[in-house]
Structure formats: C-alpha cells, structure tokens
Amino acid sequence: MSYEGKPYRFDPGALCLELLTTGGPGAFARHEVLHAPADLAAWAARSRLPDGLEPAVSEEELAEARAFRDALFLLTADRAHGRPLRRDHLDVINAAAARPPLVARIAPDGTRAWAPGATAAQLLSTVARDAIDLFTGPYADRIRECGAHDCYLLFVDTSRPGRRRWCAMEHCGNREKVRTHRARARKSASRPTEPN
C-alpha cells in the first residue's frame, strides 16, 4: 500500500528480494508479517515461485526463516550502498543454500508441479541459492535501495539502461516528480519579476 492507502505493484526483481518485504531487523521489525508458520507458506504462494507450493513450516523453522531474512536484508542493504559484505550474514545465506532445495516435477498433465513434502528448509535453500546467483551474477552491481528519502525497499535493477531509482514509479517515483515540480514552482514564484 502506498502512503495514500492505494495499492501499487513492487517488483524487487528477484525471488530472494521478495522475502525482504515481509519485515526486517531493527526498525523494520514493525513491518513483520511472518507471525505464524502459515504466513511463510502464504508468502511462498504469493512469490514468483510457480503455484502449488505448500511447504510444511514449524514454529522453529519460522524463527529460522525470519533470522535468514534479516541476514539477507542486511547483506542486501550493504551491497546496495557499496559497503563490505559481513561474514556472519554470508554464513547464514551459505548455510541455508547448502541444504537440499525445493524439488520440481512434471505432473501427468505436463505442467510443472512440486514434489510432495516440501519443507521450510527447502524453501530457504531455494531462496538462498537465488541470492547467491544474484550477488555473484551479472546484476550484482545493480542492487539498489529506493531513491526516495523515506523508502528503504531494496531491488535489483533489471532494466536495460540500468537507471532505475525507485521501488515503483507509481509510488515513490511520482511522489518525487511532484516534489520536484512543486519546488520549481515555489522557486519560480519567489523570483522577482524584472521591470519592462
């Protein structure tokens, strides 16, 4: 939801970055949406993963998922701001990636499906592997934080020119355009007129 209460679409550009919209460490904990095990399964259903995934999640795995998300959040923010990547955050991501990932299969009707018995550990492994691909791949230098002064959403700029600055143009981008326009109008209105 925007500040005005209007829905808008935010695409962070990668599966791993979608998890960051569920809350975060420190001040970002107020945005927490992973309160119960079912919340992690619901996030998976809304993510860019193909439909039909219903991982079993325990309370302990939910706590592990939040800790993983927080480490990924801090790692991504460090990357977006050009800071050195912290070893403890990397260790969390690498440990999750070392576990077996989700298993896809072909259903009898020829569509993609998930192998039964998916677990939260497999889900986190899949997300961690996506993070490793992002942080070591061709878009590693395009990980960004929204350019608005009061928005901290993290995304990967997959646009062709590589100049994306906003979480979403219809949200922060438009607010910034309005702010810039008003500042120019105020400046123009306060400029004294020259006599003829």
Image (cartoon, rainbow, N blue to C red):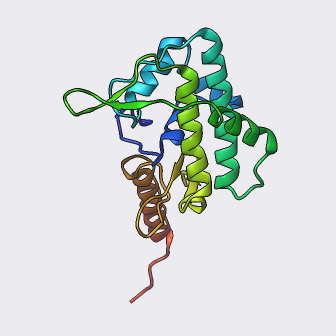
Count of numbered labels shown in the rendering: 0
Above or below residue 64? Residue 20 is below
Residue found at the far bottom of this picture: 196
Residue found at the far right of this picture: 87
Query: Where, quadrant-wise, is the C terminus in this rendering?
Result: bottom left
* Camera-nearest residue between 31 and 139: 139
Would residue 163 be seen by someone viewing this image from the given angle? yes
Quarter residue 67 falls in: top right
Query: Where, quadrant-wise, is the N terminus in this rendering?
Result: top left
* Camera-nearest residue between 115 and 29: 115
* Camera-nearest residue between 165 and 180: 165
- What residue do we see at 67% from left, 53% from top? 79
Position of 31 compared to 75: left or right? left
- What residue do we see at 45% from left, 36% from top? 3
Give x and y (percent) for residue 191.
Answer: 49, 73
Above or below residue 183? Residue 29 is above
Give x and y (percent) for residue 148.
Answer: 54, 51
Position of 165 compared to 53: left or right? right
Give x and y (percent) for residue 155.
Answer: 52, 49
Quarter residue 8 falls in: top left
Give x and y (percent) for residue 164.
Answer: 47, 60
Residue found at the far front of this picture: 108
Above or below residue 86? Residue 124 is above
- What residue do we see at 60% from left, 17% from top? 62
Would residue 150 be seen by someone viewing this image from the given angle? no
Position of 71 compared to 182: left or right? right
- What residue do we see at 46% from left, 19% from top? 41
